[in-house]
Amino acid sequence: MTFMAALSALWASSTTTLGDVTAVTGSATANPTMWYITRAAAISAYITLTVTVILGLFRSLVRVSRIRSRVVLWLLDEAHPFLAVLTAAFVALHLLSLLLDPLIPFAPLNLLVPVAEPYRPFAVDLGVLALYGLLILWFSSWLRRAIGHTTWRALHYTSFALFVVVSAHGILAGTDASRPWMWLVYLGGSGTVLLLVLARLFMPPMDAPQVSETPSARRQWNA
């Protein structure tokens, strides 16, 4: 497929999806720019969230394995929180673009309370609940020293259930959810997370590392 043919296919896919939304909302003349930003931010947030969860699981597997590479430890300890912050930025952009999008009249209350949603109510309600779950995880990580390791760890275990809720929100509310490439994202990400969870559950714990790790790894080894 040539570059121009690929662009034409992408445009055809986008216009079809936009037509689906305008058919639901009845707003066929509004500027769709914010709607495109909403889509891009939501998909980006899901991808970065998925990678964040995967890296967190990898880090947990490293803790109970014999891997002692400083490079691996450094990458996991630095990339995991960075991607969590990047996910928060994409979520914020997604919410802001929803408020500014003339195609679907979202009010601030719609993003904070799961009632009277103007678009696919059940799916959006899941998104509101997922937002509060993400906020709890983000703030608990920033306040980890204040709340203690045990509380932080217990809250962090809810991230797996939260990932399921976020995935359900995307599948039910996302206008790209029916696209084959988006299903590859959902199935690939969810499948990888599931395999890593099973690996973590059934991998026998090893002895704690006796070699020198990175400073951040020493601080967080028991995460």
Image (cartoon, rainbow, N blue to C red):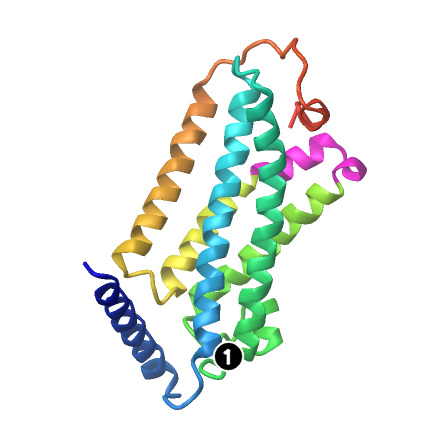
Is 162 placed above or below 2 here?
above
The residue sitting at 48% across, 42% down in the picture is 51
* Residue 78 sits in quarter: top right
Q: Is residue 190 magenta?
A: no
> As drawn, which residue projects farthest toward the left?
1
The residue sitting at 30% across, 76% down in the picture is 15
Pinpoint residue 106: horizontal percent, then vertical percent. Answer: 53, 78
* Residue 140 sits in quarter: top right
The residue sitting at 43% across, 66% down in the picture is 39
Pinpoint residue 97: horizontal percent, then vertical percent. Answer: 54, 72
Pinpoint residue 138: horizontal percent, then vertical percent. Answer: 66, 48
Is 218 placed above or below 122 here?
above
Pinpoint residue 79: horizontal percent, then vertical percent. Answer: 58, 38
Compared across the picture, whether 171 is left or right of 152 comes to left
Reading the image, the residue beneath label 1 is 101
Q: Secondary structure at mark 1?
A: loop
Foreground residue, 151 or 193? 193
* Residue 192 sits in quarter: top left
Foreground residue, 197 or 79? 79
- Asked whether the viewer can see residue 209, the reply is yes
Report the span colored magenta: 144-157
Q: How many marks?
A: 1
Q: Few, some or many C-alpha atoms within 10 Å of disc 1 (few <14, some 14-19, many ≥20)?
A: many
Q: Quadrant of the N terminus?
A: bottom left
> As drawn, which residue projects farthest toward the bottom?
29
Q: Quadrant of the C terminus?
A: top right
Q: Amino acid at mark 1?
A: Asp
